[in-house]
Amino acid sequence: MLTRDRPTTYVRQREPDLDHALNLAGHVADLLTDQVTSTRVVGHLTTLLDDLTPYRRQPAVRELGERVHALHAATSTRTS
């Protein structure tokens, strides 16, 4: 999914589609939670968060940030 329909694509458009990007990113985070260990995919989500910096005050962006940070910690623990 991430190779064809990346959330970052929707954020980097001339007119960002935050709802679509956050929806896709949330779905990816759901898949990673307790199911998949993928440092690469967590890295993609971290890149998305960087792209979402201008929108960091929006509740949905803050929530995604919390989820990605938790996934990053969990992935680091699982791969250690």
Image: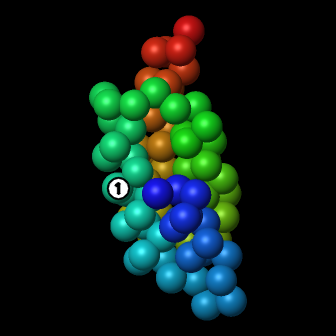
Determine whether 50 is above or below 67 in the image: below
Q: In the rendered view, how is the structure colored?
A: rainbow
3 shown above or below 12: above
Count of labels in the image: 1
Q: Is residue 63 visible?
A: no
Tell me which corner region of the image, top left, top right, bottom left or bottom right, holds residue 41.
top right
The secondary element bearing badge 1 is classed as: helix
Q: Residues within 10 Å of mark 1 (few under 14, many from 20)?
A: few
The image shows residue 58 at horizontal and vertical percentages of 45, 70
Q: Look at the image and tell me whether residue 13 can be seen.
A: yes
Give the residue at the far bottom of this rendering: 15
Relative image position of residue 8 (x, y in whole percent): 60, 66
Q: Residue 60 appears at what percent x and percent y?
A: 39, 65
Residue at position x 34%, y 43% from top?
Answer: 31
Which residue occupies 40% across, 51% down?
28
Task: Quickly name the residue at label 1.
Answer: 27
Depth order, front residue of 57/43: 43
